Amino acid sequence: MSAPAIPRPESLSISSSSVEELLIPFPLELQKVFNRLAAISKEQGARKHPSEEAIDWAADVLLRVVPSAYLIGAEIDPFESEIHVTWENNNSGKSVIVFFHGPPQIKMYWEWMQEGTQVREHQLLTTEDVSEVSARLRWFFQ
């Protein structure tokens, strides 16, 4: 005699849409962002270089970006003592640049170009609120 089947609680079942989301090759794309930060950390040169504190601050803030899919396609480069993270979309004319110098400050610049030449919107923001990065990227990806 077999034991009666125990019904599975609804909270433990996985919907098909959840499974489909997991099949996207997403972790590799995210890893590229943090691999780039690690590579910048190892770069040596005569020019001014971002401090470990600035690199760690950039990683900390980028880990808090929600949804993390916004990190796909981000260009990460050192510039003197800062880390610059850039998103550009030629089709929409939007761009966002986040400047990381060190905690707790974040500087962001964004613009929206119309027909490649006229600026429809642009702004520079200095903040300590890390959620502002996600908010600006939400605008960028709309």
Image (tube, grey):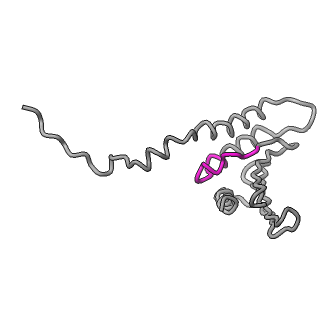
Q: Residue at x 47, y 45 (%)?
A: 20
For this rendering, which residue is in front, 141 or 85?
A: 141
Which residue sits furthest bottom? 120
Q: Quick one: quadrant of the N terminus? A: top left
As for residue 63 lying within the magenta part, the answer is: yes
Which residue sits furthest left? 1
Residue 116 pos. (x, y %):
85, 62
Q: Quick one: quadrant of the C terminus? A: bottom right
Residue 73 pos. (x, y %):
70, 46
Residue 31 pos. (x, y %):
64, 36
Side of 68 relative to 6 (left or right): right
Q: Residue 97's image quarter?
A: bottom right
**What span is colored magenta in the figure?**
62-75
For this rendering, which residue is in front, 94 or 32?
A: 94
Side of 65 relative to 107 (left or right): left
For this rendering, which residue is in front, 121 or 98?
A: 121
Q: Residue at x 68, y 37 (%)?
A: 32
Q: Residue 112's image quarter?
A: bottom right
Count of numbered badges drawn on the protein:
0
Answer above or below: position of 44 versus 117: above
